[in-house]
Image (cartoon, coloured by chain):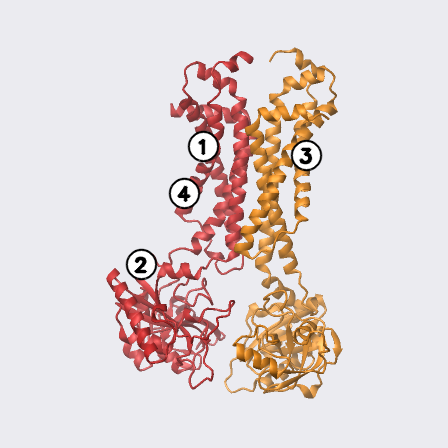
Amino acid sequence: MQLRPILSTLRRHKLTAGLLVLQAAITCAIVCNVVFMIANRVQRISVPTGIAENELSVIQSTGIEKGANPQAQHAADLATLRGIPGVQSAVAVSYSMPLDQSESSSGICPSKQALDRAMQNNSIEGSGCVEPAVYDGTPGLIKTLGLRLVAGRDFRPEEFVSEGKPAVAIVTRALAQHLYPGEQALGKSMYDGDNYVLIVGIVDRLLRPNLRAPGVDGDSLISPRRPPDLSVLYVMRSAPQDRASVLQAASAALLKLNPNRLIPPTRMQTYQEIRAEYFQRDTTMIGLLLASALGLLFVTALGITGLANFWVQQRRRSIGIRRAIGATRGDIVRYFLTENFLIVSVGIVLGMLLAFLLNGVLMQHYELPRLPLFYLPIGALLLWGLGQLAVLGPALRAAAVPPVVATRSV
Amino acid sequence: MFGYYIQMALRSLKRSPILTALMVLAIGLGIGASMTMITVLHVMTNDPLPGRSAMLFTPHLDPLPLNHKHRGDGPDPTDNLTWPDAMALLNAHPATRQAASAGGSLLVRPARADVRPFNVSGRYATADFLSLFGVPFAHGQGWSAADDASRNHVVVLSETLARKLFGDASGIGQAVRLGDSDFRVIGVTADWRPQPMFYADLSAQSFGDADQFFLPLSTAVDLKFQTSGNQSSWGKGDSGDSMTSGEMTWLQFWVQLDSAAQVQAYHQFLIDYSAQQKSLGRFQRPPTDAKLYSLMGWLAHKNLVPTDVRLQLWLALGFLLVCIVNIVALLLAKFLRRSGEISVRRALGARRRDIFQQLGIESALIGVAGGVLGLVIAQLGLWSVRHRPDDYAQLAQMDMLMLFGTFALAVFASILAGLLPAWRACRVPPALQLKTS
């Protein structure tokens, strides 16, 4: 294939070719960044929580009776809930679950010295102290949530307290590593400002109710403390297909047991609904990003096809002459494919520079990480493929031009 | 001549229907996506109280100790005022009207047996609140400063809540049980729902349902009602009643100032007040930290538009840009294909200006058609935005301004796209084309 004739033709159509290059470049730049953003969001929404997500459902109950004993009510409620057909186990937690947004967190230190350092600096930074999310609940919490113990043991029934602070805790592996880097955390005593808290168990993973940064999202602490308030969240474990019926039965049973309570319909959820709600903006964004990437590629393909069609019509005569003097149909198709390849290639080179510029702007304003280099060859392949596909139709039409055209005057 | 050009343009567009359709589709998609996002941004940065907003201002003081470190992700404590500061500003009353308020959610226990207890959100406010913002009344009236002072159990309900509690009767004079206390209904407001809810704690909630009740702030403090906004405290020991503590901010404060001189004077008053508090040892930071925001200035300062929405807007505009470049290329091809026709017209005496005009009108026609399509696509886009569960979603409606904006943007974009091709085409030499073809 000779490039010379293609280049000299393009030189005569600088403006149109330039516009195609520009369009390919902008599309390449935007699509590279959009695909990168999609990948980031997908990674964000697929974070594992560490709990048995598709077997859990929750129902919130807020007592409105003054002077009632909340914990006695919780115990009675739990006994009722455990009697519902399909419920394998049930526990009460204060108000939160992973990705459930309202979070209770408190500073905790590996030692008293670390706390003194933090007090001195008036900041938790660099002191060795961390700020984990704190979960509480009634006995059976670890089993009901489906947490995986990797060291130590579950709480003993006598370790659960109804008021005050418990003397033991179970931490996540991430928290254990952050508190005691390179050491065995099991059996260590953490200092919470007033008391020492013994680590009796380590679970593999338990995500925070609110994500902060990837490094600290796994920092959670489970405290054997019964929920003290009138407002409580009941967590029930059942087979996935039973969840809807369990929730309906639970609401009816709780109101029957004691009607002096509020059960907001928005807080009768399967865990998957909680998770979907947390990531709702991200899923919307993924949809929009995907739609705009496809839209951009579609419009670019339209442009390429439209212009190629125009060029084929404009060059009917010269195509005919080439055919008459011996060029095969394949030669003609290859000519147009190569021409498109050249244009798109220039566009891609320009587009990669633009992609990095755009990424720089996005990094500044939208906390996007740096675009990894491997996105560039992917973007290039995508655009080359798109260009070849878009130009194929017009090229085949060009190949169908009969050699006899050369002998006619227009 | 204009009518003739339009006729010619229509004829030319009809000659290549597929190309025309592609161009209209491209511009329609770009305009539709852009107008959807511009409309969302427009409703989020709207003036919530047209006509009154220019006179409303919110003062902000900085009572934080010098060694206080603000955590980046938490709400700014100086967004709100402490109880002592709010009361001091209220009692000095240098403004035409001034009111302190805080949001709250209360349990309502209806007297009717057929309605189960439910939670409603409303505001605890001082007497001037309702007249300051011009909240319209359907029945009755608001409370007085005397009610504030004696912490009376009076309440103003929204029409919606009154209807839910009392059926069709206005309910004036009736008792309603809020939390664990009885309140006497003295007024019912017509629906009042400015969006964004500029007067509330914007870090906690910025768009949402109308307030269902208003009751005296002093009564709420007296009864220790829960508030729904942020409470930021920095004191070491919690001494006594935290709601009236000078080390916790939780109150929103608004004033009405009618003239520039009054604004100036009020700002000076804030600085003087801060200086006085500093000399008393309560404030530690420079008195010039005291700020007075206008309503729109405050909204801009709080920046209510989520970064995702901004990103979506840029994405849509980027898409429109690619669509425009696309149309430039297609129009160029289309116009140059008619070099023959153009050179004949030029040879017959048409000036470059005439050719330019004719082709410009042709691109504008594509823009008008693209605008119509864009409008349909934007309505679809807004419909899908309204189905998002975000709190601002329900507001996503086009007003007249956005409607005309759509067409203006479409025609502007298409004329912009037509400029280069038309310029190139009107430089076709008169005779040369005739010769070769």
Mark 3 or mark 1, which is nearer to you?
3
Residue shown at 57% from the left, 37% from the top: A23
Position in image of residue A379 (x %, y %): 65, 44
Position in image of residue B9 (x %, y %): 46, 26
At label 4, which amino acid type do we have? Phe
Which of the numbered marks, if any, corresponds to residue B364? Answer: 1
Q: CA distance from mark 3 to mark 2?
A: 58 Å
Q: Which chain is orange?
A: A
Mark 4 or mark 1, which is nearer to you?
1
Q: Which chain is red?
A: B
Q: Quadrant of residue B61?
A: bottom left
Q: Secondary structure at mark 1?
A: helix
Are circles 4 and 1 on residues that touch, CB within 8 Å? Answer: no
Decide if residue B154 is in sight here: no
Residue shown at 67% from the left, 70% from the top: A56
In this figure, which residue is indicated by the disc labeled 3? A388
Left/right of residue B273 with respect to residue B45 in the rendered view: left
N-term mark: 2 or 4: 2
B304 up-or-down from A17: above or below: below
In this figure, which residue is indicated by the disc labeled 4? B404
